Amino acid sequence: MKHINYLLLFLFPILLLAQEHSHRSSRPLTFPDIPGYKTIKSDLHIHTVFSDGNVWPNIRVQEALRDNLDLISLTEHLEYQPHKEDIPHPDRNRSYEIALKEAQDHDLLIVHGSEITRSAPMGHNNAVFIKDANPILQEQAEKAFTEASKQGAYVFWNHPAWYAQSPKGTPIMSDFQKTLVEKGQLHGIEVINSMDYAEESLALALEYNLTIMGTSDVHGLIDWDYTEKGNHRPITLVFAKEKTLPSIKEALFAGRTVAVYNDLLVGKEAYLVPLIQKSIQVNSLKYIDDTQVLEVVLENLSSSDLIFENAMTFSFYSKPAIFTIKAGTSETLRIKTLENLGQLQLELKALGAYVAPRTNPVISWDLRVGQ
Ligand code: ZN
């Protein structure tokens, strides 16, 4: 007993330190890389007390670490500061600076951003990858976008379907947005904002070739707003050549993203298909005894539950055509191939994934039996 206590005495401070610095949690978001790209987990729409949020910027950094994110941006409203009597902060860069300092010893990238806030038709827009937030604070909306553009910012339209600005709950692409797109000053659009997904926003993303975004737009705590309710925070997966800010910026401008909220995944086919393809690992593949029933064990490596529908002509033994592979777990499929095949294409429609409004992609895996 004595030597155990002795050991603990030495270990205790080390354990305490490790705990303080790892921010480990039971809710990490995980997605595999896709061929040619690193999968960057980002949330680029977040508020703190420096605008209308309720927490200090360091809490946002710690939440992002608990969620296993790679990149965040604190996008304070430039024009709306309800806490300014208690926290006067004429410098609109403060929130970013505090977050940057908090994140310096961690594997989390912070990108400088701001929210340009107007009523409809301009609406709310986030400019990220900015250099200085102060000159973006402008009386005239057009001037704010011109300044963001001058700084090389990536700009996206926030919650275009928000009913406070668009009472029908559907986005209205006004001449203001059309002109911005033409001038190259608007590059992305939120199709998922907090708990809301709008398929009309996805349609606009595809029509105007805007980058598909998903964000938490969190004002309270991630724990209270999402985790406690059994949800993950909405994020944008960015497919970047490297895990660096310039590389991520290039990927956002190029439209290489998938927006994720729980089991909902929304993105362009070129990225969503390989993402789901890589999220499923085939662990075992064999015919049951002397039968023509092929047994396949599929493991979901992602943190999203994946819902599939059989898209093959072959039917399943003892399983319905629609089934779910929960995040981080395995499911066994028994496929009635009618004859013993050496090779076949497993084809499943991903029902939680959208490449266009109400359009699910069919994902295929090349199965080779008996190796
Ligand atoms: Zn916002």
Image (spheres, rainbow, N blue to C red):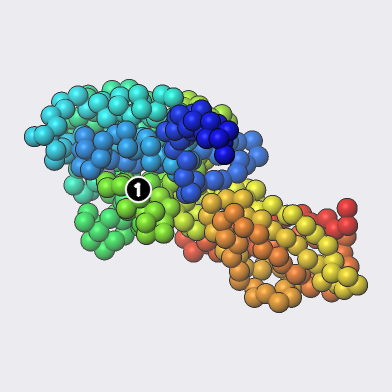
Residue at image location 60% in from the left, 36% down from the top: 37
Residue 343 image point, x, y percent: 84, 59
In the picture, which quadrant includes the N terminus?
top right
Q: Work out which residue is located at the far right of the displayed protein and give it.
A: 290
Residue 332 image point, x, y percent: 71, 65
Closer to the camera, 368 or 360?
368
Q: Is residue 225 above or below residue 2?
A: below
Residue at image location 40% in from the left, 28% down from the top: 103
| Mark 1 C-beta closer than 8 Å to ligand 1 | no
Q: Quadrant of residue 33?
A: top right
Residue 72 image point, x, y percent: 39, 36
Residue 136 image point, x, y percent: 24, 28
Closer to the camera, 328 or 191?
328
Any part of residue 150 in sight: no
Any part of residue 33 in sight: yes
Residue at image location 60% in from the left, 48% down from the top: 275
Q: Describe residue 167's horizontal placement relative to residue 333 as left or right.
A: left
Residue where numbered disc 1 is placed:
222
Closer to the camera, 212 or 101?
101
Q: Amino acid at mark 1?
A: Ile
Q: Quadrant of residue 167?
A: bottom left
Closer to the camera, 139 or 11?
11
Using a 10 Å C-alpha cutoff, classify the residue at mark 1 as few (fewer than 14 neighbours), some (14 to 19) or many (20 or more). Answer: many
Q: Is residue 278 above or below residue 136?
A: below
Element class at badge 1 = helix
Count of numbered labels shown in the rendering: 1
Q: Work out which residue is located at the far left of the displayed protein and give it.
A: 85
Q: Work out which residue is located at the far front of the displayed protein and give it.
A: 2
Assign ligand 1 to one image quadrant. top left
Residue at image location 88% in from the left, 53% down from the top: 371
Q: Describe residue 121's horizontal placement relative to residue 196 as left or right.
A: left
